[in-house]
Amino acid sequence: MIQGSIVALITPMVSNGDVDWACLDELIEWHIQSGTKGIVSVGTSGESPTLSVDEHLRVVARTVEVSAGRIPVIAGTGANSTSEAVHMTSEALRLGADASLQVVPYYNKPTQEGMYQHFKTIAEAVAIPIVLYNVPARTVADLLPETVARLAQVSNIIGIKEATGDLQRGREVLHACPDDFIVLSGDDPTAAELILMGGKGDISVTANVVPDKMAALCAAGQSGDLELTRSLDAELQPLHQALFVEPNPIPVKWAVQAMGRAASGIRLPLTPLSEEGRAALQPVMQNMGLISV
């Protein structure tokens, strides 16, 4: 079952922007040893918009190979073209991914019926478990709970990454869908509360920096330990906030670099974290003992 702390893994790059394959291997091992329960490979945090199709699939393949069945690998294979999403998802299945993360089609603003047909077509074309991904702040289009409920009837559409940050929306999705439909947070600042409401975990940016703490938070929330969940959440809130001082994954890539776990590479149009961004993120990481003063 896909649950718990699932890292939206960065794609590490060297200074010229090439994928750092050795570093990718090391990050995967670190996450497995730290209690991370799954990896999203080449999602937003993995810079999917700037990787070529070949690179995209190579990163998925490498992640599957290194993970070696120890934790699930969820391949980010969504697109705003249904045929492209079918192709990428078919390739992810061939490469051994355990599931596919399918983002709401971006830019072209489909209707609710268009989104329903898009996801249904992908699911019927490729026999892989599919997790929907609703993030209207990036896609503009918003997958509404009633459409999610329709899609939950498709046998291999198994869940959703609900990244609106709106807990009322999360509650509506939980109530609209069957009990076995997996509702995951995609918003670290509100993830603890969504899990306490019945969500199964969090596809997390913050887990790139503190995988052990995010694993502990998700486990506490799933077990219903309200006191521990709230305590861990309060500890992590400053980091959640600081990791979004600029658009993701700019801050998180700097944070992982500052910890000595990755090089500085990032691809245009994304740019390295600004001095102002560093001034906001660095003291939070220092206060948590993640980097030295």
Image (tube, grey):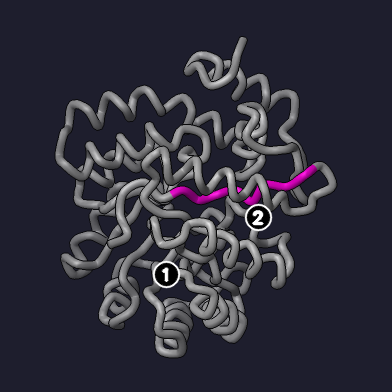
Amino acid beneath label 2: Glu
Image location of residue 257, percent across then percent down:
67, 33
Judge from the rendering whether residue 221 lies leftward or rightward of residue 162; answer left or right.
Answer: left
Front-lying residue, 68 or 59: 68
274 up-or-down from 139: above or below: above
Seen from this angle, which residue lies furthest top? 293
Residue, x 51% and y 66% (percent of image)?
75
**The magenta segment:** 7-14
Judge from the rendering whether residue 111 lies leftward or rightward of residue 167; answer left or right.
Answer: right
Q: Does the rendering let one see residue 113?
A: no
Q: Quadrant of residue 253?
A: top right
Front-lying residue, 227 or 65: 65
* Local SS, label 2: loop
Q: Quadrant of the N terminus?
A: bottom left
Of labels 1 and 2, earlier in sequence is 2
Q: How many marks?
A: 2
Amino acid beneath label 1: Ala
Residue that numbered label 1 is attached to: 99
Residue, x 64% and y 61% (percent of image)?
48
Q: Nearer the viewer, mark 1 or mark 2?
A: 1
Q: Quadrant of residue 188?
A: top left
Residue 285 part of the magenta segment? no
Q: Main secondary structure of the magenta part?
A: loop
Q: Residue 47 — which label? A: 2
